[in-house]
Amino acid sequence: MAKSSSATASATKKKRSRGGALTLNEVKTLGLELLSSRAHLNNAPVLLALLSPSAPLDLALEALISLQSFFVPLIPSIPSASAAATVGDAGSDPELVFGAWLRQRFDELVAALVELSVSAHSDDAIRDVALDALMDFVKLGKDGKFHSAIYHKFLHAVVHASDSIDPLLELLGSKYFKYTDVCYFTYTSADKIANSMSSKTTDSGKDSLRNGSDGSENKCAIFIHNIYNLLAHVPAMDYQKESTFEMWSAVGLSSKGEKDSSKDSSSTNIKKKLKLKFTKAWLSFLKLPLPLDVYKEVLASIHQNVIPSMSNPAILCDFLTRSYDIGGVISVMALSGLFILMTQHGLEYPKFYEKLYALLTPAVFMAKHRSVFLQLLDTCLKSSYLPAYLAAAFAKRLSRLALSVPPAGALIIIALIHNLLRRHPSVNFLVHWEVDENESNTRGEASQPKKIGADPFNNDEADPAKSGAMRSSLWEIDTLRHHYSPAVSRFVASLEEDLTVRAKTTEMKITDFSSGSYATVFKDEVRRRIKQVPLAFYRTTPTSLFQGSDFPGWTFGDQSNSTIETVVEDNETIEAVGTSDSTPSKRLRVEA
């Protein structure tokens, strides 16, 4: 055996020395020899050397197929890494030495497959074949269990890749994320990787700030992006429906060599295990220092893709309340998840309406996610238990914003105020409130007399209870009657109805207005049929810019033939008199 294997190795060296590189036929010959007898085991390192992203595609594919065919039958006999490390070189059983050698070559093959799968320089064909071979080894673990160690190495390389991993994730999603056990161990590995990254960033955060180097921070941001992309590509499971779970390995979710019992393999137990791993993975990920773009993407989808699949969604209350307290766009995006926790999972947030009140700024009506926010705002103000001062404060704040937002935003504000006045009849006095100069206000906060021309509402006050809205009125809405946009001036007439009679009015759907923009307003106006079109029409051609009735005491006419006379009186004044053939003009007196 030793002579034949050494002869084969020497022959291979001669071929490589003569030709400089192996040909496709030579690689096929090496693979056939390796599969035929142990005498050609030294062909394995030669074939392993061809598994590289820079190697010729045809040679790499042939070498990969040969090595996969060689190792698949031997997987049950390959010893563990710890057992292979204890084998000595001298005086050991030849089978043990062979097992240790086999373990080393197999580890090299797995490392090469991971590199081919993750590298951005790999061809799509070799990446596809390498991923399939790697997942076969994962499936054919010892005793048929899911080989979580190989899969963890693979995902660790995926997360720590510096190049784009989108093609690989698309491949994983289309082929393997449909299997429940693959998703289960994906969450398990993501949890471990995120925890290790969290400890590293905590330990080395101060050192990196002292050194002033941002290279590690940039790498950490890339790794966090990769973890998020990995978790986002795992499809969300509908736990409400009864479904069968398809497994990639024979054992299923068990990481041990024993098959699941009927109790453990039940649908309910599988859902419970999967939810637990899902929750741990996302909690570990959310503890990381998320970049701003990842932070926004998480908040935008957390109410749809994360909260429904968690074992206990209330665990997210700290993350969402911290996000809601930040302010600005982050708070707007965190409102969706926080609202679900409050309405469906019993979360108490005492200052919720104060924070919501502070979010009403002109920037909200230009934000990317304004549609969801405005719909949630309308839903949050729907409760009949909302105090009158809160309803008045929100109505007044919105009406003040109507003066500075785009036309589409003014339409939304009118719809929101319409719903507020209809739901809360106690604040309808804001629409029309006649003020007596000698009468003190006796409503709400009334101990101060109202002044004509002064608005007691304080728009800069953060506390709605102290804003003075109950002593004010919606005078801003009346100004919208003369808005430059016809759509706004027409729509504001809807507030003239008696909204206290609920049977005669209906609530407006905010979804019809929440996605509005300049483009939608323009399209609606263009499509609208106009019966009477205003034109600049004159029965006779005008002879002057202004008519005499515009400026009483003045007359305007054709002054092309006019003459100017200047008279000086006592060196004090200058009188200019204009004479014309058509119409005399008024004397102009200019002080000298």
Image (cartoon, rainbow, N blue to C red):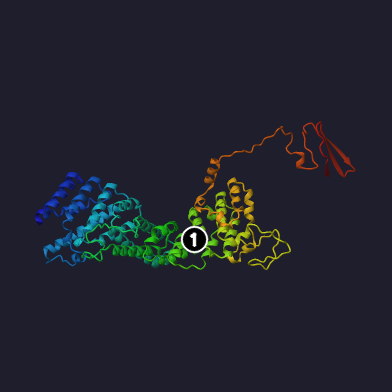
Instruction: Give the side of residue 357 with respect to residue 40, left or right.
Output: right
Instruction: Give the side of residue 556 with respect to residue 319, left or right.
Output: right
Amino acid type at circle 1 is: Ser
Q: Position of residue 520 (x, y in %)?
A: 52, 46
Instruction: Give the side of residue 411 with respect to residue 260, left or right.
Output: right
Depth check: give the residue in front, 70 or 254. 254
Depth check: give the residue in front, 385 or 67. 385
- Mark 1 residue crowding within 10 angstroms, few (<14) / some (14–19) / many (20+): many
Image position of 205 with respect to 110: above or below: below
Inspect this view and state whether residue 123 appears. Answer: no
Depth check: give the residue in front, 359 or 125. 359
Q: Position of residue 65 (x, y in %)?
A: 20, 50
Q: Secondary structure at mark 1?
A: helix
Q: Residue at x 18, y 67 (%)?
A: 86
In the rendered view of the protein, which quadrant contains the C terminus?
Answer: top right
Image position of 587 with respect to 30: above or below: above
Depth check: give the residue in front, 34 or 373. 373
Q: Residue furthest front?
A: 503
**Residue at the disc numbered 1:** 331
Number of labels in the image equals 1
Inspect this view and state whether residue 523 appears. Answer: yes
Q: Position of residue 286 (x, y in %)?
A: 40, 63
Q: Residue at x 33, y 65 (%)?
A: 276
In the rendered view of the protein, which quadrant contains the N terminus?
Answer: bottom left
